Image: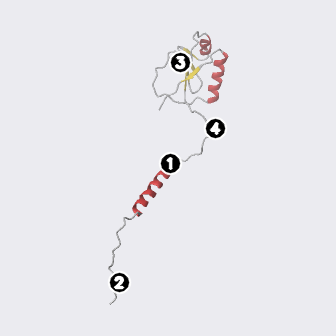
Amino acid sequence: MMSFGTYRRARNRESVVPMINVVFLLLIFFLMTAQIAPPDPIEITPPVAELEVADLPPDALYVAANGDLAYGATRGDAVLAALAARVEDSTLPLRADADLPAPALARLLEQLRAIGIHDVSLIAVAR
């Protein structure tokens, strides 16, 4: 009779397959949720919006979508004359309609510059 010795049972080793599965799932999750965007062509600092609701100044210039102007009690073409007679050297608040075409706004800013108003603050609504 041949004796082969005692059979030694191999130790049960922990399987690493579940850990590998978790790592791959995390990798897929991070790849799917990461925002991959090309870098900006030049370095810029974007403007910061303030979300505080400020009271409108009483001397704001209002511009309708069709270009109609209002400043205090003055309406229409007399607004530019009233603005020219304005003695304040502070910033002029400008509240324009969102549907006002950009060329019309540019023309208005040029007219304001022509009468001596160089500092204009465009009022926007934070949503």
Q: CA distance from mark 1 to mark 2?
A: 59 Å
What element does badge 4 sit on?
loop
| Mark carried by residue 65 | none
Q: Nearer the viewer, mark 3 or mark 4?
A: 4
The residue where tag 2 is placed is 4
Mark 1 and 2 residues: CB-CB less than 8 Å, in contact? no
Q: How is the image coloured?
A: secondary structure
Q: CA distance from mark 2 to mark 4?
A: 77 Å
Q: Nearer the viewer, mark 1 or mark 2?
A: 2
What element does badge 1 sit on?
loop
What element does badge 3 sit on?
loop
Q: Which of the pair 59/91 is nearer the observer?
A: 91
Residue at 37 percent of width and 66 percent of height? 13
The residue where tag 4 is placed is 42
Report the amino acid beneath label 2: Phe
Q: Nearer the viewer, mark 3 or mark 2?
A: 2
Q: Nearer the viewer, mark 2 or mark 4?
A: 2
Image spot of residue 124 (x, y percent): 52, 27
Image spot of residue 53 (x, y percent): 45, 25
Q: Is residue 65 above or below residue 73?
A: below
What element does badge 2 sit on?
loop
3 or 2: tag closer to the N-terminus: 2
How many residues crowd around disc 4 within 10 Å: few (fewer than 14), some, or many (20 or more)? Answer: few
How many residues crowd around disc 3 within 10 Å: few (fewer than 14), some, or many (20 or more)? Answer: some
Q: Is residue 75 left or right of residue 113?
A: left
Residue at 48 percent of width and 49 percent of height? 33
The residue where tag 1 is placed is 34
Q: CA distance from mark 3 to mark 2?
A: 103 Å
Report the amino acid beneath label 3: Ala
Quarter where residue 42 is shown: top right
The residue where tag 3 is placed is 60
